[in-house]
Structure formats: C-alpha cells, structure tokens
Amino acid sequence: MQYNFSIIIPHYNIPQLLMRCISSIPQQNDIQVLVVDDCSNSDSVAKLKEMESQFSWIQFIYQNKNLGGGAVRNKGLSLATGKYILFIDADDYFNYCIRDVFQQYKDSDNDIIFFNAISIDSDLYTQTYRCSHINKIFELYKKDPAKAEFQMRYAYGEPWGKLIRRDFIEEHDIRFEETKIHNDTQFSYMAGYYAKKIAVDMRALNCITSREGSVSKQISNDRLETRVQVFAKQFQFLHQNHIEYLDDRIFLTFDYCEQNHLKDEEQACYKIAEEFGLSKSILQKKHRRIKLKRKIKSLKKRLSKIKKII
C-alpha cells in the first residue's frame, strides 16, 4: 500500500504511555504507524502484544538487542514507505490538529514542514518549559523569518515536530547517530542543511512531556563526552560547508564539570572537541561570553522585580 505518511515511534518499557501516544493518531488508510521496540523487558513486551491485537493497523517491530533511540529510528526509516516521515516519542502525543495537518500536507512538495510544540508534565498535565527553545524560534519567525529559518535548520535538533519528505531523506542518506544521547542531532542538522524547500506552520503539532527517568535526565561521564562529540561534529560539518554555528548545548558539559570539580573529565572533553577543529581557547572564549550573557539576563530580571516593587 502507498502511504502518504509514516509515523515512527521508538519505544522502551513505557507501554502505558505508548498507549496514550498511539491513541492520539487518527486511523486512516494513508497513514503507516511503526512502533519499534528497543528490546523492552518481558512484562512490557507482553503489554505490547496485547496492543498489537487491539491496534491491528499498527506495525510493531521488536528489536532483540537494546541499541538506543538512534538505532530504533533508523530501523523505522528502513521500513517506512510513506511520502512523508513523522517522528514522535512514545511518551509524547499529537495534538488534535494532526488531522487537519494530514489533510493539508498530503500533496505537499516541501522537503520539511516545521511545526511548533507545547510541553507538559506527563503525570500532572501542567505546563513545563521543555520545548521553550522551539517556542522562541517560532516567536522569532513572526519578526525575523530569515533568522528564525536558520535556527529551525540548525538549532531545532529534535526530530519530532517536522514532516520530512522520505525521498529527500533517502537522497541524502540522512540517518541518526547511534549514541546514548543527542542521537537525533546529526539527523536534524543534515536535514536542515540539505533541505531546499521548507514551510513553517505555527500550529503546535506535538505535546512534549517531561517525566522522571527519561534518558535526557541521566548524567554520566560517557554522556558528557558524547554531548561534546556530537556538537563538535556538528560544528565541523557546518564549518566545512561555510556555515558558522556552534550549538550552546555543548557548554552544558563544561558547566557540569566546573560545578562538580571534574577537572580530568573537563580536559578529556576539550581533547574530544579539538578532534573536530574546536580548540580549547575558542571554546573558553565562547563560554565566557555565554556566562556574561547569563549574568546580564539574571541582572535584568532582578531589576525588573525591583521596579515592580517600587
């Protein structure tokens, strides 16, 4: 069957949240849904099997080894046949506008359509700020579309919130890195770099949730080093293609090392960055500028509060 849309959902040990996710997807003949399980435990797999019988129109794929989100999404890409690819995490869900979006873009010829998002606490359903960086880009788009487009291409590092033409992905062999964290960064900036025709839709397509135990909240030395490697590699790729951009998230590692007095780990991260053309002196100079901006921003907030009191 020829699908207009293929939705790829990586899953690992959260079947109850996956149920919420897939319940937000309309059942249509032109939509292919691929749930790729990353070798969940036996209890979770048993619940997935129950879902599989309940949602016969959804394809469930079971990995026999835990490889992480990047590998799982790549597996989904290898099985997708839709004109457009759409990613969503198992603990997130689509807002109701998904139905109108599918109707509007089924005959589109854009390489990428970018969407806004909202974020909430997964249990309390109260507002969070997990996707505030995305919201700021869309606010900027109202004032300065060219600057916002640059950020969508290179700073919107998440794979969700985008309809991406599958032929375009295959043409440029765009894939996810198979790292523990930030495995979606390479996919996103390469898609942003190669896309010739894009569209911007102000609607919040996804509801992004925050919860304890998510991969993004786990910290270890190898994750600190991976973050530096991923963003230094991005810097190198863009620099070689005459685009100057360094993602500020690389400095989260150095902030953490400083705050926790991890001198050896900090030096190890500097060495990794140097392998991709980012010298220690350049990083330190940019880091000082970021710290200064933070102080100024903090001072402005304090002054604003004082003025309100006065």
Image: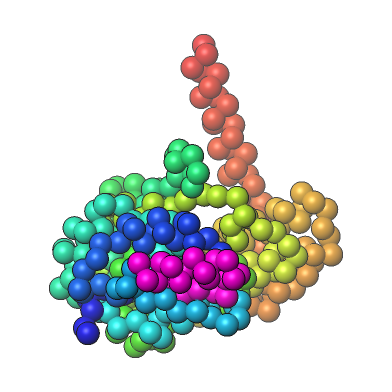
> Which residue occupies 21% across, 59% down?
99
Quadrant placement of the N terminus: bottom left
Tell me if residue 81 can be seen. Answer: yes
The x, y position of residue 135, in whole percent, is 39, 49
Image vertical order of residue 93 relative to residue 5, above or below: above
Kindly give the residue lying farthest to the top in the view shown.
310
**Quadrant of residue 277 within the rendered picture:** bottom right
Image vertical order of residue 183 relative to residue 89, above or below: below
Magenta residue check for 277: no
The x, y position of residue 50, in whole percent, is 43, 68
> Which residue occupies 15% across, 73% down?
107
Between 134 and 303, which is closer to the camera in this rendering?
134
The x, y position of residue 244, in whole percent, is 49, 68
Tell me if residue 193 can be seen. Answer: no
Q: How is the image coloured?
A: rainbow
**Quadrant of residue 67 within the rendered picture:** bottom right
Between 300 and 28, which is closer to the camera in this rendering?
28
> Which residue occupies 43% across, 47% down?
119
Left or right side of 181 for 107: left
**Range of the magenta residues?**
33-54
Magenta residue check for 50: yes
